[in-house]
Amino acid sequence: MASTEGAAIYQDVFEASPDPIMVHDADTGTVVRANQAAGALLGCAPDDIVGMHVGEFSPPGFSTADANDLIAEAATSGSAQVEWATEGPDGTDQLVEVTLKRAALGDETRVVAFIHDVTSIRERERKHAEQSEQLDTLMGNLPVVVFTLDPDGVFTYSAGKGLEGLGLEPGDLEGTSVFETYSEYPDIITAVEEALDGEEVRVTQEIDDLVFETWYRPVFDDSGRLKQVVSVARDITGLKRREERVEALSGATNELLYSRTETAAADKIAQIAQRIVDQPLAAIWSYDSGDDTLYPIGATAKATDFAGVETAADLPPMGPDSDENRIFHTSEPTVIEDYQELSNPSAPSMPMRTLLCLPLDDQGMLCIGSETVASFDGDERFLLEILASTAAAGLERIERETRLKSKQAELERSNEALQQFAYIASHDLQEPLRMVSSYVDLLDSEYGDDLDEEAAEYMAFAVDGAHRMQEMVNALLRYSRVETNAGDFEETDPEAVLDRTLDALRMRIEEVDATITAGSLPRVDADPNQVGQVFQNLLENAIEYATEADIEPRIEVSAEEDDDMVTFTVSDNGPGIPAADREEVFNIFHRAGAHDTEGTGIGLAVCQRIVLRHDGRIWVEPSDDGATFKFTLPAVTEVSGDD
């Protein structure tokens, strides 16, 4: 009864198994029994499988003889295994793993085949293998070092292209202690100890001539205990070198700002070039267009020693026929691979090999040389070309400043001559005028009663001419003293300046019943006394010309601020200025139009000189009614922050 019950249980398990199961006769290899899953696999009823031989449904390439051998192996040894690629009932490709087990049923030997679909398993294994291969390839080619440490600081993994810089192969560190291997590098030991204590560490470390940026990250298990430390070290030696070169280049720019002579700038440029490329032979030549020759103006000490000369100026020039001169005129950076192979070098006896020539616009040329055949990498070329551009700008600035200083010296001499003229005009010229005027007045007082009407008229002309001449000399003095007697620029309130000007003109304004109105006038950065002179000249002219034309003067003053300048407008209702005189009206002693008003014709010339001193301009606006003058002065700019 128990045997029958057990057989029933095994029967149920056999039929309920989701995996196909087939029982084979060990002697014939034929199927003696199959479950429902086996029928589903082969697409037929289980009873139809009974009596079939494995070779009848096995995949191509697996014969009946192969099947019999496999069954015989299992019957003899107890088990055997094979993997088939087959087609499932739905037509899709499948991988099945067939495991054969020997089973004894009384006196008979059977071989049971357990068939398991391993398609998804093999696919996962394939993908895992691909990913592992990709990871190994990636780790083997990344320019980093990847390693792991166990809680005792022993390397458990090491890989990465960065190992080559350390003279190591992947796996060389595995099994060694970091504390022993890198005991001479305290920075590494300190960082590892912090990481083993559970801290995440990012640090820059040096190993001999190499610089690494290393990240240590602790990994913990589910209980919170340290499992391992994962680290990635990136070789940043090249990056550090580039940073140093960029800093050197930045320093060159700052140093050139303080260079005041061509030779001082050239020496600095040569030294910076040496630091950028680690080449001690650097020199710079200045171009003279007069004889189409490049002359040496600066060099490193190693360059002059190499050439066997005492100073940079003793280096050979690069004449019109030299190869270096030809390169300069191409304006293109050029590498001479081997200086000894040039057909017409400027220094044929110099044992130079590789030479990099960098033209500096039309200023000259920077040359960096090597005693051996060498090369300049892309970074070096790029930084040197930036240096060349900076050097060209610096030398051009020095040349411009030299010309400016020369002009300033000429201007100072001219101002000295003008001051001498002003002294002569104020003393030597006015003294004869005062004498003429005094003696004419004396003649008039002593002999006026004895002179006829015509003689008296002549004497009046003489006195008037002397007075007018004196006024013109005084006006010319005012014009010449616009610069010499000027005050400092300061924040100036034009409204207050205009009020003071109107007070000074009050009697004349009331005398002719003039009306002067003013709007809001923005503050300016100016000489307040000179701003008052401009207002006074323009208002006096407007009053006098309107009064002469029998017009009651009406004058308006306004202003507008635009960016960094304030534009003032002074307009009147007088006779206006003819279009032909609008440009010449600012010339010395020029008086526009026909009129009988007194004046020297120098007031507007003074106004123009004052405005120009303030970097502004003055002009006459076209107008059909009266005259409109406009002039600009610098606005007051707000300065925020501390110096």
Image: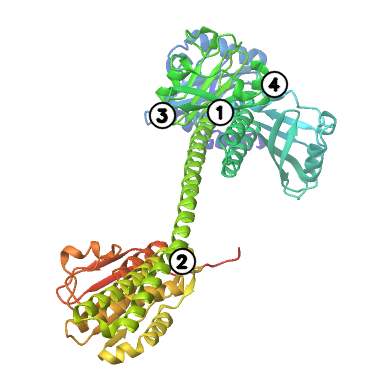
Residue 394: x and y in percent read 52, 39
The answer to which of 371 and 575 lies nearer the viewer is: 575
| Alpha carbon distance from label 1 to label 2 | 69 Å
Q: Of circles 2 and 4, which is in front?
A: 2
Q: Of circles 1 and 4, which is in front?
A: 1
Which residue is denoted by mark 2 in the rendering? 427
User: Can you say which quadrant of the picture contains the N terminus?
Assistant: top right
Which residue is denoted by mark 1 in the rendering? 380
User: Can you say which quadrant of the picture contains the C terminus?
Assistant: bottom right
SS under mark 2: helix
User: Does label 1 or label 2 sit earlier along the sequence?
Assistant: 1
Packing grade of label 2 (10 A; few <14, some 14-19, many >=20) is: few
What is the basis of the colouring in this image?
rainbow
Q: Mark number for residue 169?
A: 4
Quadrant of res 270? top right
Identify the amino acid type marked 4.
Answer: Glu
Quadrant of res 162? top right
| Alpha carbon distance from label 1 to label 4 | 31 Å
Is the C-beta separation of discs 1 and 2 under 8 Å? no
| Alpha carbon distance from label 4 to label 3 | 60 Å
Residue 119: x and y in percent read 49, 29
Identify the amino acid type marked 3.
Answer: Ala
User: Does label 3 or label 2 sit earlier along the sequence?
Assistant: 3
User: Does label 1 or label 4 sit earlier along the sequence?
Assistant: 4
| Alpha carbon distance from label 3 to label 2 | 140 Å
| Alpha carbon distance from label 2 to label 4 | 98 Å
Is the C-beta separation of discs 3 and 1 under 8 Å? no
User: Does label 3 or label 1 sit earlier along the sequence?
Assistant: 3
User: Does label 2 or label 4 sit earlier along the sequence?
Assistant: 4
Which residue is denoted by mark 3 in the rendering? 45
